[in-house]
Amino acid sequence: MKAAVIRAFGPPDVLRLEQFEAPRPGQGEVLVKVLAAGVNRIEHYLRGGTIAPLDFPHVLGSDAAGVVEAVGPGATRFRPGERVIPMPGYPLDEREADVRPISAAPSYALGGILNWGTYAQYVLVPERWLLRDETGLAPEQVATLPMALVTAVRAVKGVGEVRADTRVLVHAGASGTGSMNIQVAMALGARVATTVDDEAKAAFARDLGAELVIDVRSSDFVAAARDWTGGKGVDVVIDNLGGAVLQRSLHALRPLGIVVSMGFVVGEQATFHVREFFFAHQQIRGTLMGDVDDLEWGLHLVAAGKVKPLLDRTLPLAAAAHAHEIIAANRVLGNLVLLPWAA
């Protein structure tokens, strides 16, 4: 099989297309032919060596849409030819499979960190962590969904407790996670404000239905959010940026409100005024990833037309390095997808 491989940490050009023998499914495993592989920002950080140690050679990638190629001994839930969607992360220790949320399990890992991922023509997945693809969408559309959708459902619906008429501020609304957070919040009946940093992203966020789009180049998002809420502050902030943005998110939040922290693009450290924080009874809640139930719930929204896959563009697997360059430069509206079988 062909796979986009890294043999050392470094810039995007360490990603090279190489030929390997296709793996064989073991006990309880399914061999999935990858029809399309989503590219996420975290893989840019993994490639650069800033997230976790990796064993080389290594194949990145956690998102995929595919078809069952073969099943291993004891795997009975799927048959060759069925369209499937792997969970983007799961516990590697079977004894922890019932921990909830699954991302709290000690052995939890995103695909493409402790095992070979989806930047390849085939990937092995334990059958427990496969879902049937009943979306009816093209593989390249489906591949935009798993990580962004399951993370958004967990962050917005579960951790943020967003419901009808909640006022939500979503940061980086044109990014893969931000755009999905907007859609999930709106599907729950929330009113959404979002931040962007250029006009193309602003237009993209408006098309998604955001009620208030704040261009942070010319506007202070705290002042804009407070003005939008009549000075009260928003009920929930979904913060995928971290750093100084997280500390200012508290200023945009009403008393008793919730900041959901789910990323650190701006920085890993934040400081805030403790007295103001606890006097206002505010909460900061962390979230990493959702469960199978979260992804299934999100896929029902997709089937109902309430959430749409946001595909920026597709690239052949051989262009994985270029995909990482695009993500690193923040030139993505939605999601990038690699096509492992494209010329």
Image (spheres, helix red, strand yellow):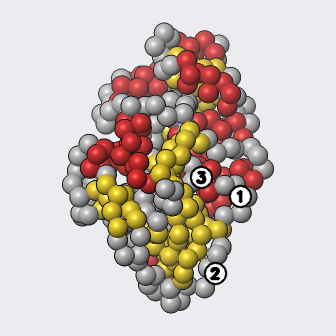
Label 2 sits on what residue type? Answer: Arg
Return the residue found at the far front. 343
Q: Dot 3 lies on which element? A: helix
Question: Residue shown at 43%/81% (left/top)?
Answer: 24
Q: Dot 2 lies on which element? A: loop
Nearer to me, 59 or 233: 59
Q: Dot 1 lies on which element? A: loop
Nearer to me, 219 or 169: 219
For this view, does 59 lie left or right of residue 180? left
Question: Residue shown at 48%/59% (left/top)?
Answer: 340
Label 1, label 2: how far apart the Cα atoms are:
18 Å
Q: Is residue 107 above or below residue 342?
A: below
Question: Residue shown at 67%/31% (left/top)?
Answer: 208
Return the residue found at the far top. 218
- Percent across and percent down for residue 117 are 41, 62
Nearer to me, 3 or 230: 3
| Of the two numbered discs 1 and 3 in the rendering, the one whose residue sits closer to the viewer | 3
Residue 304 appears anywhere in the view = yes
In this figure, which residue is indicated by the disc labeled 2?
79
Identify the mark at residue 140; answer none if there is no mark.
3
In this figure, which residue is indicated by the disc labeled 1?
135
- Percent across and percent down for residue 47 are 30, 49
- Percent across and percent down for residue 151 are 53, 49
Q: Tag 2: Cα neighbours inside 10 Å, few (<14), some, or many (≥20)?
A: some
Image label count: 3
Q: Earlier in the sequence, mark 1 or mark 2?
A: 2
Q: Tag 3: Cα neighbours inside 10 Å, few (<14), some, or many (≥20)?
A: many
Label 1, label 3: how far apart the Cα atoms are:
12 Å
For this view, does 324 lie left or right of residue 36? left
Quadrant occupied by the N terminus = bottom left
- Percent across and percent down for residue 270 are 33, 30
Q: Tag 1: Cα neighbours inside 10 Å, few (<14), some, or many (≥20)?
A: some
